[in-house]
């Protein structure tokens, strides 16, 4: 049974939702994995109509499970964006097979192209740029690429952002020559300040790709710290560590209220600011994340600018 009627676009925002936060959350996306999707009886009971759903492809997940999840979400009426992690794709033939399955069985027209969080490549690909260069994504209407507001030590082991920025400029150049709509989806962060600085830096470097900023959904603090360390989250990890030292907050679940409010206020004050949407990582559960988003005004579907 549905807890709330999320299906109508005209669902009003709760009285406590601020206008900047409501606007900022409009058109949010969310990420699932096949094993977590199996626990959801019907996504239409949780997510606003038109919500983009990413399907994370973790190393070892059979492509059959990925395609089945995409097919199910498409049948429930959601635009699906599966991950294409370069380092777990053996060769061009494998990539072509995956794309054919997604398109043929689930009508997939969107994809997140990324390197993938494994130490070494399984075959001939090690970067998202190599995947894009194959030309196999020509039939896709939307392509998202990875962004790293706090750097990426897989790319820049010295802690700098030299190679990260070079990759961002390459992705911008690719965007300029493709018909697909493109955006940069990021890892989750817990502090707005480094995010704002990074988005401004992209703009200064000539990278104009819209940013879909990663936000961790409500979860136990210990869970978030574990994921943050595993995913290489940098400066904003201090926000969680500081919270962990406060015994009054240690046992309370983390909610992204503060970081979302700060980014929303910045976007409201600077409409040209490069963040276009929020992308949720539901580390504390899909239902929990969807409920939080709805309570804070994120009850409307994907805006026309993202369609």
Image (spheres, rainbow, N blue to C red):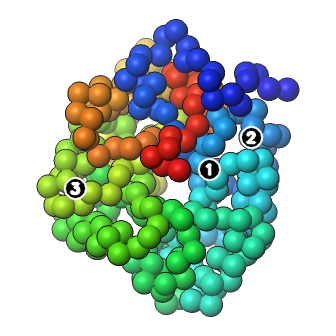
Relative image position of residue 65 (x, y in whole percent): 76, 65
Residue found 45% across the figure and 78% down from its top: 132
Relative image position of residue 286 (x, y in whole percent): 65, 38
Q: Nearer the viewer, residue 122 or 34?
A: 34
Q: Nearer the viewer, residue 255 or 230?
A: 255
Q: Secondary structure at mark 3?
A: helix
Q: Which residue is mark 2?
A: 43
Tell whether label 2 touches label 1 (CB within 8 Å).
yes
Going from the N terminus, do you reach mark 1 or mark 2 first? 2
Q: Is residue 49 visible?
A: yes
- In the image, taking residue 268 as reference, residue 251 lies left or right, namely right
Residue found 52% across the figure and 23% down from its top: 297
Q: Secondary structure at mark 2?
A: helix
Packing grade of label 3 (10 A; few <14, some 14-19, many >=20) is some
Residue found 61% across the figure and 65% down from its top: 109
Q: CA distance from mark 3 to mark 2?
A: 35 Å
Packing grade of label 1 (10 A; few <14, some 14-19, many >=20) is many
Q: Nearer the viewer, residue 285 or 223?
A: 285
Q: Is residue 277 above or below residue 172?
A: above
Q: Secondary structure at mark 1?
A: strand
Give the farthest residue toward the top.
15
Q: Which residue is mark 3?
A: 202
Q: Which residue is mark 1?
A: 53
Going from the N terminus, do you reach mark 1 or mark 3 first? 1
The N terminus, quarter of image: top right
Relative image position of residue 58 (x, y in whole percent): 61, 64
Q: Is residue 16 above or below residue 258?
A: above
Q: CA distance from mark 1 to mark 3?
A: 26 Å
């Amino acid at each position: 049974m549905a807890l709330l009627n999320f299906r109508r676009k005209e669902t009003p925002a709760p009285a406590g939702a601020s206008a900047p936060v409501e606007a900022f959350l409009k058109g949010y996306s969310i990420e699932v994995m096949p094993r977590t999707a199996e626990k959801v009886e019907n996504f239409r009971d949780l997510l606003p109509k038109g919500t983009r759903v990413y399907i994370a492809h973790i190393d070892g997940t059979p492509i059959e499970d990925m395609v089945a999840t995409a097919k199910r979400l498409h049948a429930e009426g959601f635009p699906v964006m599966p991950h294409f992690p370069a380092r777990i794709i053996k060769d061009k033939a494998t990539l072509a097979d995956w794309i054919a399955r997604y398109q043929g069985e689930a009508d997939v027209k969107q994809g997140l192209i990324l390197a993938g969080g494994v130490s070494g490549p399984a075959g001939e690909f090690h970067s998202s740029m190599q995947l894009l260069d194959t030309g196999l994504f020509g039939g896709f209407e939307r392509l998202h690429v990875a962004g790293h507001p706090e750097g990426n030590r897989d790319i820049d082991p010295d802690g700098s952002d030299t190679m990260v920025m070079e990759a961002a400029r390459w992705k911008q150049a690719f965007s300029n020559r493709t018909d697909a709509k493109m955006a940069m989806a990021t890892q989750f962060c817990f502090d707005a300040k480094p995010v704002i600085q990074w988005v401004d830096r992209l703009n200064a470097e000539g990278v104009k790709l819209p940013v879909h900023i990663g936000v961790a959904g409500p979860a136990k603090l210990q869970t978030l710290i574990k994921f943050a360390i595993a995913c290489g989250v940098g400066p904003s990890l201090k926000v969680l560590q500081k919270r962990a030292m406060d015994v009054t907050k240690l046992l309370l679940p983390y909610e992204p209220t503060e970081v979302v409010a700060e980014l929303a206020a910045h976007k409201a004050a600077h409409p040209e600011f490069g963040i276009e949407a929020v992308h949720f990582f539901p580390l504390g559960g899909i239902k929990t994340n969807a409920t939080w988003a709805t309570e804070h005004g994120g009850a409307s579907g994907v805006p026309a600018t993202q369609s």
